[in-house]
Amino acid sequence: MPTISVTRTYLEMRSPDALRSYHADEANVRFERVHSCPLSFFRYLYREVGRAHHWVDRLAWSDEQVQARLDNANVTLWVMYVDGAPAGYAELERHPDGSIEVVYFGLLPEFTRRGLGKLMLTAAVERAWEQGTSRVWLHTCTLDDPAALPNYVKRGFAPYKDEVYTVEIDDAELATLRSATPAA
């Protein structure tokens, strides 16, 4: 199985004033908190948003593990809908230090390259600041969409740490990752 090197970049925002918002007059777009998320919907979002980016950590989670995550009072799940269809999601988590992490963030493949990532990131970060925090942070890696890191920086996040690690990816998944990544 091929092994590839991946760079993970951590970014943070330390003030709501740092957010460079992106708003569009999109009457057909909603960003809503999901209060009682069905397990199957949570699994669908994670699997389909992360399919092209090697999101595998939660695929083997039991129903009990997923339910425990959804029941965690420090975790909120937000879904973006476009014309009534789910387009992407963000998962926010408050940590013991009071910071809020954007744990997962992404769009379904059919909704990429339309400016919706800027809109959804703005909405997610605004929700994080509304929860009361002194720091919003996240991380991305070179397996994520190439537009992710530039979007985070353009919205006001500042990188503060990089780390390099390796992952084993089977040939089929490697081909999927390469086909999902536009040529530079």
Image (cartoon, grey):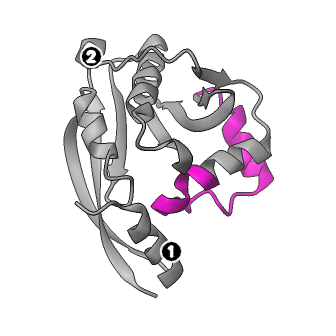
- The image quarter containing residue 28 is top right
Q: Nearer the viewer, mark 2 or mark 1?
A: 1
Verify whether residue 65 appears in magenta. yes
User: Where is residue 120 shown, x and y percent of the image?
Assistant: 46, 28
Q: Which residue is mark 2?
A: 15
- The image quarter containing residue 100 is top left
- Closer to us: 134 or 173: 173
Q: Is residue 74 above or below residue 43?
A: above
Instruction: Tell me the kind of residue under disc 2.
Output: Ser
- What secondary structure is found at the residue carrying circle 2? loop
Q: Is residue 129 above or below residue 57?
A: above
Verify whether residue 175 appears in magenta. no
User: Where is residue 127 shown, x and y percent of the image?
Assistant: 48, 18
Name the residue rendered at 46%, 44% in the picture: 112
Q: Which residue is mark 1?
A: 173
Q: Are marks 2 and 1 in contact (CB under 8 Å)?
A: no
Instruction: Tell me the kind of residue under disc 1.
Output: Glu
